[in-house]
Image (cartoon, grey):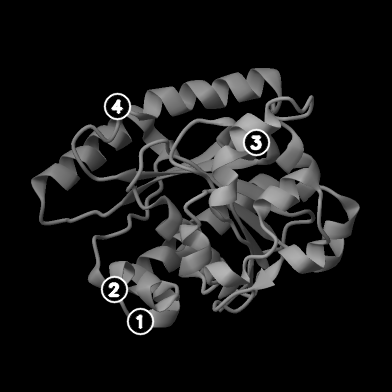
Amino acid sequence: MPDLSRPKTPRVMALANQKGGVGKTTTTINLAAALAERGLEILVVDLDPQGNASTGLGIEAEHREFTTYDFLLDESKLDDMILETTAKNVSLIPATVDLSSADIELFANEKRSFLLHDAIRQPDMDRFGFDYILIDCPPSLNLLTVNALVASNSVIVPLQSEFFALEGLSQLMMTIREVRQSANPKLRIEGIVLTMYDARNNLSQQVEADARENLGDLVFESVIPRNVRVSEAPSYAMSVLNYDTASKGAAAYRALAQELLKKNDKMAA
């Protein structure tokens, strides 16, 4: 498979949507696997206290001795925090429920919004050679999500193909605008990816039409279908690309990775 140019520095992308159940973690895991399949080195940062990305990538709770909480506070060595996963070329900093109290505990820290930014850009990270860092955000617009937006070059927004899908976007867009104005002026929206799409369903088609009409080129051409293989894969601690490489879900995430890489290649040119 032809490889597009590697970024000179890691591209940091937050996968964010304050609504739960939109396919955010699923997209994080499978996009990471699809990028890694092209020979790129990927780091997933699990910033969701539920730790679903950690479970989906094969890291059981008892093996999460050091987590993103330690990463934020610079309390442990990177070699202890960055773990290999079931997906080739995909590493992970896992999460546990400890993160759920981070908002309260970090609030008194003067650099509370920049902790993840500084952790990702510490000099010791360079030796790992990551090309892309994907941050799986919690389903809320809290201090953890703000940390992810401040740390990132761009945001990918998974959008479930269902009624009211577009309604919650305005609050996220407002938060992104505020982060741009206050802390990260270069933050951009990488794209909005339609998930759980059923081409036979009039509602899915209507949501797509509305999204493309209102958001134009911000919506990825690639859409993620409602696919049983995508749903089953996490229970086997695998990406859908590993679980069923010939499935429609695997093909969709490969297409999304290709589209994302082309977009970043054009911007770097």
The quarter holding residue 63 reads bottom right
Q: Secondary structure at mark 4?
A: loop
Pick whichever, 1 or 250, lies toward us.
250
Q: Residue at x 30, y 35 (%)?
A: 211
* Crowd around label 3: few <14 · some 14–19 · many ≥20 (10 Å): many
Mark 3 highlights which residue?
147
Mark 4 or mark 3: name the one nearer the start of the chain: 3
Q: Secondary structure at mark 3?
A: helix
Asked whether residue 39 is in view, the answer is yes
Alpha carbon distance from label 3 to label 2:
32 Å
Residue 167 disc label: 4
* Crowd around label 4: few <14 · some 14–19 · many ≥20 (10 Å): few
Residue type at mark 3: give it: Asn
Mark 2 highlights which residue?
229
Q: Looking at this rendering, what residue extends furthest in the right direction?
A: 123
Q: Quadrant of the N terminus?
A: bottom right
Alpha carbon distance from label 1 to label 4:
34 Å
Q: Secondary structure at mark 1?
A: loop
Residue type at mark 2: give it: Arg
Q: Residue at x 43, y 39 (%)?
A: 17
Q: Position of residue 244 (x, y in %)?
A: 35, 81
Q: Vertical placement of 142 versus 154: above or below?
A: above
Whether residues under marks 2 and 4 lie with C-beta atoms below 8 angstroms apart, the answer is no
Asked whether residue 187 is in view, the answer is no
Residue type at mark 1: give it: Asp
Residue type at mark 4: give it: Glu
